[in-house]
Amino acid sequence: MLELVAARLIAPTLGVSLYTWTSVIGVVLGGVSLGNYLGGRLADRWPARSTLAFVYLAAAGASLVVLAVLPFVGSLELPRSAPALVQVLWVTAILFLLPSTVLGAPTPLLTRLTLDSVAETGRVVGRIQAAAALGSVLGAFATGFFFVSWFGTRHIVAGVAGVLLLLAVLAGLPRALARVWIVGLLAAVVVASGWASRSPCTRESAYYCIRVVPGKVSFTTPSGRRVVTEPAQQTLYLDHLVHALVDLADPTDLLYTYEQQYASVLARVVPHGGRLDAFFAGGGGFVFPRYVAHEYRGSVVVAEIDPAVTSVARELLGLRTSPRLRVVSEDARVALERLPPWTRFDAVFGDAFDDYEVPYHLATREFDALVAAHLRPGGLYLVNVIDGVHDDFLRSEVRTLRAVFPYVALVRPASGWPPSRDRSTYVLVAAKREPARALPVVSAVDLATFMRGGRSVLLTDDHAPVDTLLAPVFSQSLSRR
């Protein structure tokens, strides 16, 4: 349970990436291994139920330490010059190495206390290991499928501490110390549960810590532009990143540059008030779906995998669904695959790319082919891509789109061309044929020069190293916070 919530707890600070999951899994496995070793030493020296009880008691305390240290994680980071993977590993170890180590100790103690003779060693060890594995499976399923969305991560940690406290009592904590320790830790669990209710999240789902901040907010966009929102605007954060700026009063007020580029491209192809059937891979703040529904006739289908994001958008961000603006709570790829083969769109928008958190299966050649199958002959596929430093992911996206679409272009960035070495937002346009009207894109010559200037990978379902391609962006993001 702690392993699953670990990534969610650090996501608002560090995001979710291959680095975070690798660090969490590695730290927990390392802690459990160290705990197994120390537990074996304890089992040989003090083979008693009271020892097991104190281990459970220590595990309850170590779990509460996670909640105590969590608010100070930002101040415990390494210097900015440290590599990103080391920074993530350091923060993860501070939070979860201690509880993982203590929770690895009960297994050898239980084995030692259960053994009556050497002849039973294989059966006893096998039974306890099987029980431990079954407990891990049940804990993982219950936490991932139900508990995170029901209770939130902080309440889960407090609940784990409470269960471990109960196990300490059941294991036989000495009476002389039981009352003092139990009362003290029980009070700590109650306090921790109350503190957990003060989560920074407006809502916590299985996917994100969702925050909606009303009024004036100051931040830097992925393209490096400093933005100060107006009092009437809402800012949507998914984990640690600003995901949308929403003007509740005016759905045509597009505050992000890439949304303005989307609108500029559409206006060249379909005049305002014309018919436009659109599909969106990702909803977020639903800013551009609202814009399309307001400015064009036709239908808008949005595939937003997280129903909690859609719910928050309805309650706080002005989303009004209707037969013309429909939301399906599915992964965009699954939603497209389930559509009848004759369903076609005038435009498909790829808006599920968020910094170094990229759903790789929406960036592959196979997904591009699926999009092409649901585009009308003159339809457009517009993809929002965030990259920087080396821009290897952007080159790979261009190369992959070219494997499916005859026409692929890059909308001229607001920051100019060629790109800088900083994190930036780009919009790619792909189509089955070149649009009749010229689009505001980088010239073919300049794009060809850009493609020759660095590494690119053909992204497929079998090989899509997007985390590796975006690792420099992740490192730059951490160093500039």
Image (spheres, rainbow, N blue to C red):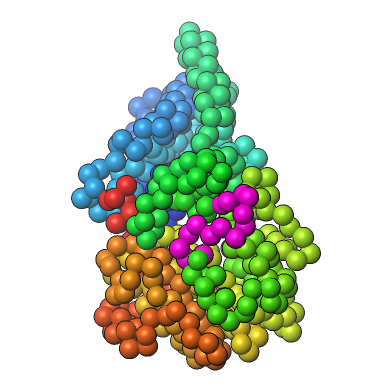
At x 45%, y 51%, the residue is 241
In the figure, 119 relative to 375: above or below?
above
At x 62%, y 79%, the residue is 270
The x, y position of residue 32, in whole percent, is 40, 42
In the figure, 202 relative to 329: above or below?
above
Q: Nearer the viewer, residue 43 or 153?
A: 153
- Horizontal side of 406 relative to 102 (left or right) equals right
Instruction: Based on the picture, tell me whether residue 189 belongs to the magenta stretch.
Output: no
In the figure, 62 relative to 297: above or below?
above
At x 53%, y 29%, the residue is 198
Image: magenta residue range: 246-259
At x 40%, y 75%, the residue is 412
The x, y position of residue 2, in whole percent, is 49, 40
Q: Nearer the viewer, residue 304 or 444?
A: 444
The x, y position of residue 389, in whole percent, is 28, 66
Residue 478 seen by the camera: yes
Instruction: Based on the picture, tell me whether residue 249 belongs to the magenta stretch.
Output: yes
Q: Main secondary structure of the magenta part?
A: loop
> Image quarter for residue 413?
bottom left
> Image quarter for residue 72?
top left
Q: Nearer the viewer, residue 293 or 347?
A: 293
